Image (cartoon, rainbow, N blue to C red):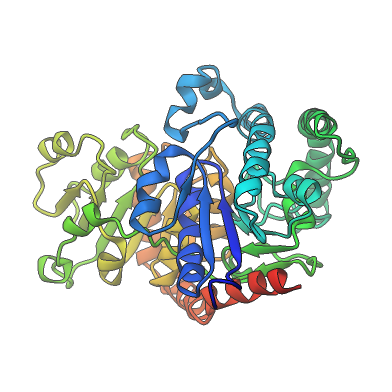
Amino acid sequence: MTRMSQKKILFACIPADGHFNPMTAIAIHLKTKGYDVRWYTGEGYKNTLHRIGIPYLPFQNAQELKIEEIDKMYPDRKMLKGIAHIKFDIINLFINRMKGYYEDIAEIHQVFPFDILVCDNTFPGSIVKKKLNIPIASIGVVPLALSAPDLPLYGIGHQPATTFFGKRKQNFIKLMADKLIFDETKVVYNQLLRSLDLSEEENLTIFDIAPLQSDVFLQNGIPEIDYPRYSLPESIKYVGALQVQTNNNNNQKLKKDWSAILDTSKKIILVSQGTVEKNLDKLIIPSLEAFKDSDYIVLVATGYTDTKGLQKRYPQQHFYIEDFIAYDAVMPHIDVFIMNGGYGSALLSIKHGVPMITAGVNEGKNEICSRMDYSGVGIDLKTEKPRAVTIQNATERILGTDKYLDTIQKIQQRMNSYNTLDICEQHISRLISE
């Protein structure tokens, strides 16, 4: 691709690891193919983008919101549950920030006339498309949230009903949600559209906008770990697992040769609750309590939260408590992965064929946990703070049968057959050339 013909691609996402990280491999791949790739997001990702050689474009009109500071900015949010929590997040974390995002993108387009916008599914890509007449490729960084008559309401973590009465209940919940959640969110979203001189949306929920209005919607994952649907719009393409590529040199230095450290004749369990959740009482401490007298080897990735304190409190020889554990290095030795439902972690577990135990509710993790349980690759504990005995029982269920291992290995084979980056490139380049 010559400099004269070099196509310009703008990546954009809200400032959150779960939205930024899955898109990095696509951006690096397109850059190596000769595209002029630049990225608009929060300042927290400036250094990472510098490391991977992609120019960073900062917020100007948009307000920066760091995921780890949400509860400080909105102190009442942590008291909300269920529908109230979902509605609050949709309005305050997403819709109310969209105008600033669009205004920044419009200004960027004046100096960097990009040929396509590649954005995460919560970014206002459809607004950019309508206002600037630019093709949009959205990345589904969470399980597909598109509503459907045969599926439960997205956000409450329910699996599809199979009985007559179950389906009636499922439909009743969706009807009530339209009134309790989406009536208000539609009002707020339509106020945003009017302020930008755009036509209102009458029938779509906020979850439907990106899947239905993007030129292509590249869904992270595969159908086998999603709920079955009667039909799927042509614009939605499952692409396999998008893996993180950030060239983090600090983490590279922390990598260990686990194959030389671990006794692989024993069952090995990996525990993590991600880097955002700092309350160790939710999952890490109950897991350590569950296995402190066991024969299992337990690896714990603390995400740099009170690692030394945990090491002192739990000095057992079969515990390895670390700030950071390189999942790709250790996963070939792991028998069970206990985690709080991050989508990237779940996909990585499938990539390596490791059954999982999930314990997550908020920030949409209940939807991820529910799907892992439904597809047979793990057990959903349906709570953010399971008891030690609950973790013990779930672990024994997984290790006591071949069912979970056999299922995840079949799905692993299917997922690893996707040439993910080439699939993404083909769809993006097609839109640019049209």
Instruction: Report which quarter residue 230 is drawn in.
Output: bottom right
Q: Can residue 393 be seen from the camera position used here?
A: no
Q: How many marks?
A: 0
Instruction: Report which quarter residue 105 is drawn in.
Output: top right
Residue in the foreground of this view, choosing between 323 and 48? 48
Residue 287 left/right relative to 94: left
Q: Quadrant of the C terminus?
A: bottom right
Residue depicted at x 79% and y 56%: 212
In the picture as drawn, the residue positioned furthest to the top comes out as: 76
Q: Can residue 173 be seen from the camera position used here?
A: yes
Q: Position of residue 202 (x, y in %)?
A: 91, 40
Residue in the foreground of this view, choosing between 373 and 116? 116
Residue in the foreground of this view, choosing between 180 and 70? 70
In the picture as drawn, the residue positioned furthest to the front comes out as: 4
Q: Position of residue 47 (x, y in %)?
A: 35, 47
Residue 77 versus residue 314 in the image, above or below: above
Residue depicted at x 41% and y 45%: 45
Residue 26 versus residue 387 in the image, above or below: below
Q: Quadrant of the N terminus?
A: bottom right
Residue depicted at x 50% and y 75%: 33
Q: Position of residue 97 (x, y in %)?
A: 64, 32
Q: Position of residue 370 (x, y in %)?
A: 57, 53
